[in-house]
Image: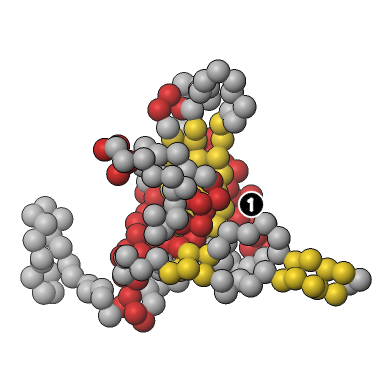
Amino acid sequence: MEAQLYKDCMRYYPFVLGAQTVRLIDLAAFYAAIANEGARPRPHAIETIEQDGRPIYQHDPRALDWIGSADRASFYQLKSMLQGVLARGTARVVKHLSPFVGGKTGTTDNAVDAWFVGFTNDVTIAIWVGYDNSIGGRRSLGPGQTGSKVALPMFEPIVQAAWELHAPKTALNGPSREAMHQLATLSIDPYTGDPSPAGS
């Protein structure tokens, strides 16, 4: 509830695996919080209102809500894992973007919904593909249709336009000073899972 990811939480076991209806705008805001180490932007529809060429309303981009139940180091580690989705996971078709983007593909049962949410330091883009007006039940996108096949291909041209028009293309930020105090670098033996001896 604190992350404001779900409007209504239904208490049943598959909830922990993500088996819960979520609005796309709330999903995008949560991924933006991952990019910001827990600072969740407030979704908004109006950026500026002008009258006679003068702005009479301007959205405050600094309006953030901190998700306090997880520390900044945990959010940074999650951001790093989501970079790995592009580098070597289900979104590896765009692995050339992995230094600059983190994200996640998703597909529901029977390929009814497919999505991809990707974020940079400045922009979060959420793409959903499905039939939102399917009368009488849920309608599949078809066999083998996944988030990486039908939603992910739309992401790259959008993020390239964002880099051209909104914010420069920059590598994802490293851990903040606060997160760095909670992180430790330790070599792990990939075969045993034990810490490796120093220098090996």
- Whether residue 96 is visible here, answered yes or no, is no
Say which quarter of the image contains residue 33: bottom left
Classify the position of the N terminus by image quarter: bottom left
Helix, strand or loop for disc 1: helix
Say which quarter of the image contains residue 35: bottom left
Horizontal side of 37 relative to 187 (left or right) equals right
Q: Residue at x 36, y 68 (%)?
A: 68
Specify the amino acid type for callout 1: Ile
Horizontal and vertical percent position of residue 143: 46, 21
Classify the position of the C terminus by image quarter: bottom left
Reply above or below: 190 against 165.
Answer: above
**Which residue, given by chain and number where applicable, does mark 1 sit on?**
158
Q: Residue at x 67, y 69 (%)?
A: 59
Nearest the eye: 39 or 123: 39
Horizontal side of 56 relative to 149 (left or right) equals right
| Residue placed furthest toward the right | 52
Horizontal side of 92 relative to 197 (left or right) equals right
Please tell me how crowded label 1 is: few (under 14), some (14-19), or many (20+) other residues with Cα within 10 Å: few
Horizontal and vertical percent position of residue 149: 50, 35
Q: Residue at x 49, y 32 (%)?
A: 113
